[in-house]
Image (tube, rainbow, N blue to C red):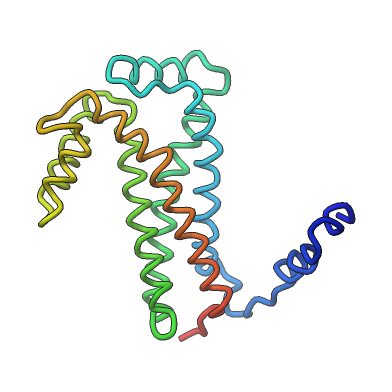
Amino acid sequence: MKWIEERLPGIGKVAKDVAEHPVPSHTLNVFYCLGGLTLIAFIVQVVTGVFLAMYYKPTPEAAYASVQMITNEVRFGSMMRSIHHWAANFMVIFCFLHMLRVYYTGSFKKPREMNWVAGSFLFILTIVMAFTGYILPYEQLSYWGAVIGVETAGSLPVVGEMAKIMMQGGITVSPEMLSRFYVLHVLVLPAITIAFLVAHFVMIRVQGISDPM
């Protein structure tokens, strides 16, 4: 730590401030841990997702076969895929319950409206990440799920048709659709999520945790 402190003066003070920051007594229950559990699930997905991305092939011809190879041939592949799958499910559940807790306790009210908006976007991002991940095995259910998702996006006012064309890679469904969902899942959505998470936690630190009802 001394070596780091010499090159980054003040880093020790910042770390100590984070570690020793007082927490209100009313937050010491599981309902106030749901946001942290959501973050942990996201981190687990990032770690296992990096492993899976080393073997996954985002083409219509090879996607399903590569998933089967990960499951049946790659060492720890089946375990990593299962962890990734269940972490995604738990992330959606934890995020949903976290938002219910925030709404029920009135924690979205002034002066925390912007944090509520950031959290709402994070919930939407969580759902979209789960959906794009569901598409990647590219089996029958995944394919038709993608088609339904694209048609749903196409029904949005003003931007719907443009979003539909961008997602499916043309006027009709094309082989590029899978690669676009893949890029969304592993690059675009996680990057946006991390940005919103940083903003979310900065606002929590500045505003503090809301008082109980």
x, y percentage for residue 117? 36, 70
Q: Residue furthest front?
A: 7
- 15 or 148, which is in the foreground? 15
Image position of 155 with respect to 46: above or below: below
**Residue at image x 50%, y 41%?**
45
Image position of 197 with respect to 135: above or below: below
Name the side, left or right, on which 68 lies relative to 156.
right
Figure quadrant of the N terminus: bottom right
**Residue at image x 47%, y 57%?**
195
Name the side, left or right, on which 7 lies relative to 70.
right
* Residue 143 in which image quadrant: top left
Image position of 72 with respect to 184: above or below: above
x, y percentage for residue 202? 55, 69
Name the side, left or right, on which 204 lies relative to 106.
right
**Residue at image x 51%, y 81%?**
210
x, y percentage for residue 125? 36, 53
**Residue at image x 35%, y 64%?**
120
x, y percentage for residue 156? 13, 54
Image position of 140 with respect to 47: above or below: above
Q: Residue furthest right?
A: 2
Figure quadrant of the C terminus: bottom left
Q: How many marks?
A: 0
* Residue 138 in which image quadrant: top left
